[in-house]
Amino acid sequence: MMNNPVKFIEEVKNFDKNNIDDWKLQKVKEFTSKPEFTFAKMEPISSAAANLCKWALACLDYNVIYKRVKPLMDKASEAEGDVRTAEAKLKIVKVEVAVINAKVANLQG
């Protein structure tokens, strides 16, 4: 993979940071938790490695936050769907009430 930089860059760009298996996170943390796995420590050695460290750590941080926020986003989406359904039902009821009011007005008039 590293012998084809274009392919490697595409894989990095398309990496699914939302869906990292827990067992993979544990394996990766064995490396990322080391004190030398930082941008600052790697930069004097290799700017490419430093940026890769920075990217990997950012992906891990994002994944932790995403896993906390995703259930909330799902609940919000479900609630929005419930609101749309309730609004549609309310619209139907308002039409029915208008029809009944028209009939009552006709009977009174």
Image (cartoon, rainbow, N blue to C red):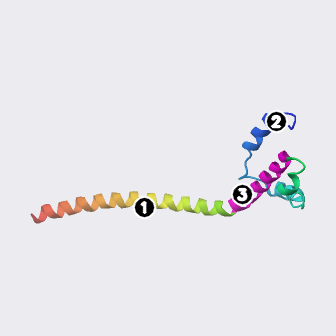
Mark 2 lies on a secondary structure that is helix
> Quadrant of the rendered structure where residue 71 is?
bottom right
Read off the residue under disc 3: 62
Read off the residue under disc 1: 86
Amino acid residing under circle 1: Ala
Mark 3 lies on a secondary structure that is helix
* Residue 91 place in picture, x, y as percent: 34, 58
Amino acid residing under circle 2: Pro
Of 34 and 11, which appears nearest the observer?
34
Mark 1 lies on a secondary structure that is helix
User: In this rendering, is residue 72 above or below 3?
Assistant: below
Give neighbour class at mark 3: few <14, some 14-19, many 20+ (Cα, 10 Å).
some
Residue found farthest to the left = 109
User: In this rendering, is residue 96 above or below 11?
Assistant: below
Left or right: 94 in relation to 75: left
Label placed on residue 5: 2
